[in-house]
Image (cartoon, rainbow, N blue to C red):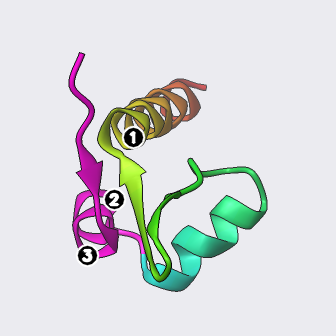
C-alpha cells in the first residue's frame, strides 16, 4: 500500500487548523504526530489525517444528536 505524506500547508488546508493549533494538539496527543523527512522537514501521513478528520466528524455528529 502506498503512503502519501502531506506537508504543513496541505495539513492546514485540509483540517482548517492553524500551525500553532496543530502543534498544540500534537503535544497533547490529540492529533497525529508528524514524521521526520530530513534535518528540517516534517510531514504527516495522509491516511492518519483522514482518520483524525473522520473521528472529528463522528464526534461532532454524536454531540449534535444529544
Q: Is residue 7 above or below residue 50?
A: below
Examine the rendered structure and indicate whether residue 25 appears above or below residue 55.
Answer: below
Q: Which mark identifies residue 53?
A: 1
Q: Is residue 27 left or right of residue 66?
A: right
Dot 2 corresponds to which residue? 15
Residue behind mark 3: 9
**Mark in front: 3 vs 1:** 3
Q: Are marks 1 and 2 in contact (CB under 8 Å)?
A: yes
The part of the chain drawn in magenta is 1-17
**Is residue 10 covered in magenta?**
yes
Residue count near mark 3 (Cα–Cα under 10 Å), binned few <14, some 14–19, many ≥20:
few
Q: How many numbered discs, if any?
A: 3
Residue 61 in the image, given as x and y percentages of width and height: 44, 29
Residue drawn at x 41%, y 71% is: 17
Please tell me how crowded label 2 is: few (under 14), some (14-19), or many (20+) other residues with Cα within 10 Å: few
Instruction: Verify whether residue 41 appears in magenta.
Output: no
Considering the numbered disc 2 on the image, is that residue within a helix, a strand or a loop? Answer: helix
Task: Work out which quarter of the rendered image holds the N terminus and state it.
Answer: top left
Quick check: 30 left or right of 12? right
Q: Nearer the viewer, residue 22 or 8?
A: 8
x%, y% of residue 38? Answer: 44, 70
Where does residue 9 sit, x and y in percent of width and height? 26, 75
Give the mark nearest the N terminus, 2 or 3.
Answer: 3
Q: Name the outermost residue toward the top.
A: 1
Amino acid at each position: 500500500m502506498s503512503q502519501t505524506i502531506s506537508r504543513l500547508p496541505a495539513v492546514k488546508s485540509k483540517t482548517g487548523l492553524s500551525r500553532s493549533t496543530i502543534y498544540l494538539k500534537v503535544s497533547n496527543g490529540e492529533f497525529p504526530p508528524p514524521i521526520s523527512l530530513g534535518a528540517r522537514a516534517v510531514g504527516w501521513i495522509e491516511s492518519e489525517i483522514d482518520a483524525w478528520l473522520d473521528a472529528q466528524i463522528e464526534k461532532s455528529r454524536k454531540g449534535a444528536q444529544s
